[in-house]
Amino acid sequence: MKIMMFAHGGSLNRGCEAIVRSSTNIIKEKTDDTKVYLVSSKPETDKIIPQLDEIYEGSSSSIKKYSYDWWMALLKVKFFNDESYALAKMENNIIKRIKDVDVCLSIGGDNYCYGEQPALYEIDRRVKAQGKKLVLWGCSIGDEDMSEKKLEDLKLFDAILARESLTYNMLKSKGLNNVKLCADPAFTMEKEELELPKGWQEGNTVGLNFSPLVWERNKDSQAAVRELINHILNTTDLTIALTPHVIMDGNNDYEVLYKYYEEFKNTGRVIILPNDLNAIQYKGYIARMRFFIGARTHATIAAYSNCVPTMVLGYSIKSKGISKDIFGEEKLVLGLEEISSSEKLKAKFDEMVSEETELRQTLQKSIPNIKKMSYKAVEYLAELVK
């Protein structure tokens, strides 16, 4: 079986790296003689994933002005309101690879959470036109993200593998019968434990991850998180390890976290992890934390999967759905509008500390089942290509 992963923006987002790395591992572990190829918009960032058989350039191309393709695209849009010719030319780096594989996995877990995706829709149509299997791999989609165009696109898939039950139930309610429930593949990802940094307290360190996405969408959250840091320093003896997980230009956790580090480093109890670690190395640090507070979903998955009590600064369906599947409720998940309240942040943190033992026990019971659900995705994939 030859599999092509697409809709991947590069591994400087360590969550995207975690999806590719863990998916490739579980697919190869559970299927024989399978080749996995990745089409990436930043292929140079993905060379850190050794299990891949090949990595291809997958970025969008522009159409040269006044070229034949430019005139054809213009005519089709102007007279027929048809963007398909232009989109196909722009996404040719992906489309030209379809013929060489058996299955195409659309792997951007939450790509469908961000408005219409005409380029993805066109790629999906081309996959089906060539008679190949099309799978939406480990997705999260909210009811508020749905549209008629998106629903029509989702009907094209041979399988939609929802990584949590809120997405699964919503898609089923839309009449889609190609939906299966699994869990995010990153729950199964291995970890690499590097030497602990100076200032780390073994067994008494809390990780804190925060992102520019949250910062920008809720400006008041900046001050609220500062108050949370003060609260942790004043009411506990924990060390705080500021933990970046996305280090892309224009969307860099390290830049946000470093401002807090500068402000609190003189306390001697606030440290910051480097900005050049890969996903398994970040997971190695997160696994040795006592608690974790995170905005990035795959940073929280790294914590959950190692049974670390976790508080989620959630901003989408995925955070809520993953927590619900682990705990039976949306446990310690704060919505975007809530995290501007320092009182709510401090109250949730205190709740996490007071329920530490119970949280750890629940995770120890739930996580083995969640990992089995991650592997379910490969079973569904294998059934498709029988």
Image (cartoon, rainbow, N blue to C red):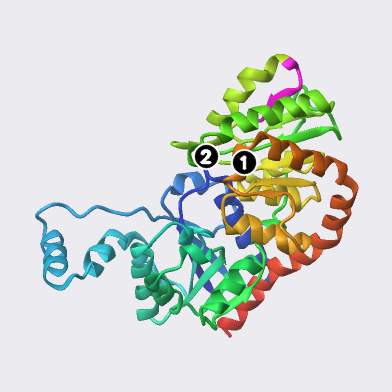
Give yes or no for residue 213 being in the magenta stretch.
no
What segment is highlighted magenta in the picture?
267-274
Q: Which residue in the structure is indicated by mark 1?
A: 339
Residue 193 visible from this viewpoint: no
Amino acid type, mark 1: Ile
Could you say whether the residue bearing mark 1 is in a helix, strand or loop?
helix
- Tell me what residue is drawn at x 48 percent, y 38 percent: 216
Closer to the camera in the image, 352 or 382:
352
Which residue carries the number 2 mark?
Answer: 218
Residue at left offset 69%, top offset 66%: 374
Q: Are marks 2 and 1 in contact (CB under 8 Å)?
A: yes
Residue neighbourhood size for the residue with mark 1, other residues' Cα within 10 Å, grouped as few (<14), some (14–19), many (≥20): many
Which quarter of the figure is the N terminus placed in? bottom right
Residue 63, image quadrant: bottom left
Label 2 element class: loop
> Is 337 above or below relative to 80?
above
* Quarter of the view holding residue 264: top right
20, 368: nearer the viewer: 368
Dot placed on the residue nearer the N-terminal end, 2 or 1: 2
Q: Residue at x 56, y 78 (%)?
A: 173
